[in-house]
Image: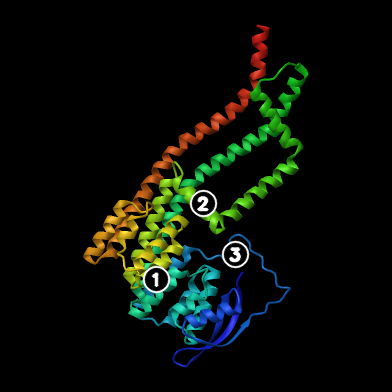
């Protein structure tokens, strides 16, 4: 859990800086200030009233969307390229952004810049809006005097990521809706329809078929022990979500996602696309290779890919080229390794990585389109088979009775 701290520090030029920063403890904040090249003079925790209440209403929460940050970046780049100063650009963006949480962050960034804090250092205080990738690229753009180009690259990167994520979510929305409907229909039949047939067959006597017994058993379980089944189901979902957020759980879950029969290919290709595009943009911006690898490891979106990137970074630090250690990890396709090897030979690794990212973006789009068209009839067939199977199980005793009478 992070806490907000107020600080006063002296930079390398002897200038006193003031501001707020989030950290897990006072020692962590002091360490962060030292890493920025500042000498802390005072670090105090910001006290908040115990009566303060925060209510997060859907659509009015403090969550900042990647799409809003992408729009901010593109507009920021346009203003700087037009000759506007940082402060004036930030003031305009603060007023015109439609996202209130982002406007609040921009306001705090503007105040820090007014005090003499560098733009990248000001952005670092807001990791929920501007992650490690964003601040590292801005820092490199500041150092190279190409902040506007850097912001444009950031905007393009964020827009591509948002578009890809939206494509995958839209493809997953249909099966989720259909499966939810199937679950509701089955639940309604078990609770309301099956008991009617159960009473009917109880009066008729005789031995029931196994499928009918199973169906009636499920209905009895839901009716008589719903107060146990419902909490257990909720607890299981909560425990699973908690587990996959742990390092060990995320590693296992991400490995499972890569091996899934149908969707594993989409997950793998999207992870490779994110790796290639992020690393390519960082290298083109001027971020050192080892720092770029650390950032890619954090933003890869898949723990298996992140672990592989970490091992590759160690090999690069020991003096190996980038392509050689990549080839030892099965998660990186041969085409990616070969193109990076050619890029190293020609001195154009960033260009090759961007070509790889473009290729895999298209692959993901094509795969998602194919899956969408394939899933629709499969899900309809699954829904029909599920409901039909329940109806057959309910009417089996009647069929047997007719055969006996006949």
Q: Which residue is mark 2?
A: 252
Percent across and percent down for residue 4 are: 60, 77
Asked if one can make out residue 91 in the rendered structure from this viewpoint, the answer is no
Q: Position of residue 147 (x, y in %)?
A: 36, 76
Determine whether label 2 and label 1 are within 8 Å by CB: no
At 45% from the left and 55% from the top, the residue drawn is 304
Q: Residues within 10 Å of mark 2 (few under 14, many from 20)?
A: some
Which disc is residue 291 wearing?
A: 1
Q: Residue at x 70, y 28 (%)?
A: 216
Q: Nearer the viewer, residue 249 or 66?
A: 249
Quadrant where the image shows the N terminus: bottom right
Q: Is residue 187 above or below residue 28?
A: above
In the rendered image, which residue does mark 3 sit on? 61
* Residue 346, picture quadrant: bottom left
Up/down of 44 relative to 380, above or below = below
Closer to the N terminus: mark 2 or mark 1? 2
Badge 3 local density, few (<14 within 10 Å), some, or many (20+)?
few
Mark 2 secondary-structure assignment: helix
Horizontal and vertical percent for residue 45?
A: 63, 80
């Amino acid at each position: 859990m992070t806490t907000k701290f107020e600080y006063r520090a002296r930079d390398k030029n002897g200038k006193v800086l003031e501001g707020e920063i989030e950290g897990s403890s006072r020692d962590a904040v002091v360490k962060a200030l030292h890493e920025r090249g500042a000498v802390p003079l005072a670090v105090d925790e910001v006290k908040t009233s115990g009566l303060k209440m925060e209510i997060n209403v859907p659509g009015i929460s403090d969550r900042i969307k990647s799409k809003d940050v992408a729009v901010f970046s593109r507009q920021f780049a346009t203003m700087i390229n037009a000759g506007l100063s940082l402060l004036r650009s930030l003031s305009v963006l603060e007023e015109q952004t439609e996202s209130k949480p982002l406007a609040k962050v921009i306001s705090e960034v503007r105040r820090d810049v007014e005090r003499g804090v560098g733009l990248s250092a000001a952005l670092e205080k807001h990791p929920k809006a501007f992650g490690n990738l964003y601040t590292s690229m801005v820092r490199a753009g500041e150092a190279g005097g190409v902040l506007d180009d850097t912001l444009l690259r950031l905007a393009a990167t964020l827009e591509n990521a948002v578009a890809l994520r939206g494509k995958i979510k839209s493809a997953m929305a249909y099966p989720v809706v259909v499966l939810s409907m199937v679950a509701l229909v089955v639940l309604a039949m078990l609770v309301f329809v099956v008991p009617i047939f159960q009473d009917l067959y109880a009066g008729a006597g005789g031995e029931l078929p196994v499928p009918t017994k199973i169906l009636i058993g499920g209905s009895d379980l839901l009716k008589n022990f719903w107060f146990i089944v419902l909490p257990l189901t909720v607890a299981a979902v909560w425990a699973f979500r908690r587990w996959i957020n742990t390092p060990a759980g995320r590693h296992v879950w991400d490995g499972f996602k890569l091996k899934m029969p149908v969707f594993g290919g989409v997950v793998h290709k999207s992870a490779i696309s994110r790796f290639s595009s992020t690393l390519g943009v960082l290298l083109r911006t001027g971020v050192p290779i080892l720092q770029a690898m650390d950032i890619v490891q954090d933003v890869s979106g898949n723990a298996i890919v992140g672990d592989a990137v970490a091992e590759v970074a160690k090999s690069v630090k020991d003096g190996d080229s980038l392509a050689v250690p990549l080839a030892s990890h099965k998660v990186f396709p041969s085409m990616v390794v070969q193109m990076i090897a050619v890029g190293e030979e020609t001195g154009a690794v960033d260009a090759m990585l961007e070509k790889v990212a473009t290729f895999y973006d298209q692959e993901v789009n094509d795969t998602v389109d194919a899956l969408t068209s394939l899933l629709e009839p499969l899900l309809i067939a699954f829904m029909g088979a599920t409901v039909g199977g329940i109806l057959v199980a309910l009417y089996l005793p009647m069929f047997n009775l007719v055969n006996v009478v006949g």
